[in-house]
Image: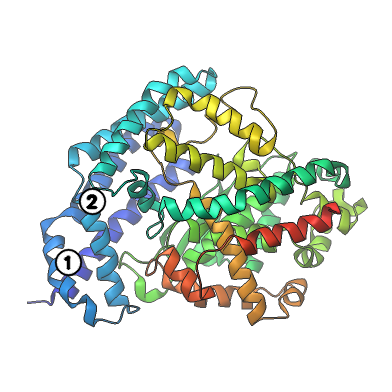
Amino acid sequence: MQEPLSQLKDRLARLTDIRAATAVLEWDQETYMPDGGTESRGDQLSTLEGLAHEYVTSDEIGSLLYALKPGLDEMDYDSDEASIVRVALREHEKLVKVPASLIEEIAKVGALGFQAWGQAREQDDFGIFEPHLSRLVELKKQWASCFDPEENLYDPLLDDFEPGITHEQIGVIFAGLKPRLIALVRAISENQDAVDDSALAGEFEVGAQRAFGERVAAKLGYRFENGRLDESAHPFTTHFSRWDVRITTRYSTSNLMRSLMGTIHETGHALYEQNTSPTLYRTGLASGASTAVHESQSRLYENIIGRSRPFWAYFYPQLQEAFPHFEQVEEEAFYRAINKSEPSLIRVDADEVTYGLHVILRFELENDLINGRVRVADLPDEWNSRMEAYLGIVPPNDTLGVMQDVHWSRGYFGYFPGYLLGNLLSAQLWERMIADMPDLSAQIEAGQFEAILAWLGEHIHRHGMKFTLPELTERVVGGELDWQPYIQYLERKFGEIYGL
Ligand code: ZN
């Protein structure tokens, strides 16, 4: 008879395949599937997801995991084997606590909620979305209650996206960061005239945009023999194994930087997935550790590297060649233009400085919603008053306000903090990287990105899902997640640009 560990590995390999097949169908749905396929695709996805869930919660996998659990203490924590058991056990123990009927109901109500959200946006009527959102909040509270949370119902939801972090830790971090961000946003607002981004406006042919995006992605280390770049309404990265990692972007002929910076962002995600250790293939661990760790990679490439002077010292002549529009624009003017900061309504379009406040607002609201401190009916008002307090602007309607993101309509509560925590980690990683490689700027200026990728591969990518965000942070920077390096980075960079 096989050892329990090799039996477990065999089951996890099949589970990984089922999930990869699900991801292929989802990728196809977002890129090439005709609209008419929506309903049948829904059936196919729900069957595969049901199958994966049955697999994870099965008694068969459970008994293998419980047979291996006592031996965990004697295994090397960092080893592939211990990590496979630890992570699979975490997921199994979590999922078996939730009744299948509740999971089904959340999926059903989530699908309806998503539909209602779309309709409510079209008619700009929060009232259409409200009953669905209320039902989802109730169901997610029930979900959270399955885990006997000590005091806060939000923590179990957070755990789905950011294992190892609590609302309390996030609250402390955000409370420190918030006033500094608000102060920086105000100071920049008072100096708005310092940056003019009118030079970015023009007409840019889609074919040339795609070619340039692919050139940059390849230069950063994205392997096109193991990937491809397609178009979708909402850009994303997906992977079916480390040898097939795909990214998407969207093009607008009047906005070159949106597709280009979006492509760099997704490249950051994709480099993570292309560089997990091959030994983790089909173990359930060959993927990014969490939302925040993933976002630390995409934002590092998009912002810290991709909006820096050294980066454009290298790429700007190439951009000018590809787009003669920029022949008359000085490199310095271009650098300042792509770093223009201004309060705006939509999170996904927000600049580096204002972005964090969009996330803090969502974290506060969803934590309050799930714990019953804010009612769904009061959400639009709560949203608008916080927008005014943090960013000094008020959405003219709910479509541009509380209904702008898809997450809550699907029942995803606890997802948002990862976006900002990822930014914090990216700044900490960058500090560490500079300490290890003092000539980093010179490397970037020379178009050398291999050492950066190797450093991230060594410290982050290769581990896949072995470690949680706090564990990885401790390993790489020798401490906890910290907001100071991030705000210092922003104050330094934007203080210089805006002459503060
Ligand atoms: Zn991202």
Say which residue label 1 marks.
65
Please name whichever residue, 252 or 406, is drawn nearer the observer in this view of the structure.
Answer: 406
Q: Residue at x 52, y 23 (%)?
A: 121
For residue 448, side relative to residue 24 (left or right): right
Q: For residue 266, which quarter of the picture?
A: bottom right
Residue 280 horizontal/vertical position (percent): 35, 72
Give the residue drawn at x 20%, y 64%: 11
Q: Is mark 1 within 8 Å of ligand 1?
A: no
Q: Where does the N terminus fall, quadrant-wise?
A: bottom left
Crowding at mark 2 (Cα within 10 Å: few <14, some 14-19, many 20+):
some
Whether residue 24 is visible to the viewer of this picture, yes or no, is: yes
Q: Position of residue 199 (x, y in %)?
A: 86, 45
Is residue 232 at least partly visible in the picture? no
Callout 2: SS: helix
Name the side, left or right, on which 105 lies relative to 440. Answer: left
| Residue at 41 percent of width and 34 percent of height | 369
Q: Nearer the viewer, residue 138 or 397?
A: 138
Residue at point 54%, 65% (across, down): 271
Relative to 386, 215 lies left or right = right
Whether 411 is drawn above or below 240: the answer is above
Residue at which label 2 appears:
95
How crowded is the residue under tag 1: few (<14 C-alpha within 10 Å), some, or many (20+)? many
Q: In the displayed structure, would residue 380 be above or below residue 227?
A: above
- Residue 392 position, x and y percent, is 70, 34
Q: Is residue 318 left or right of residue 452?
A: right
Q: Secondary structure at mark 1?
A: helix
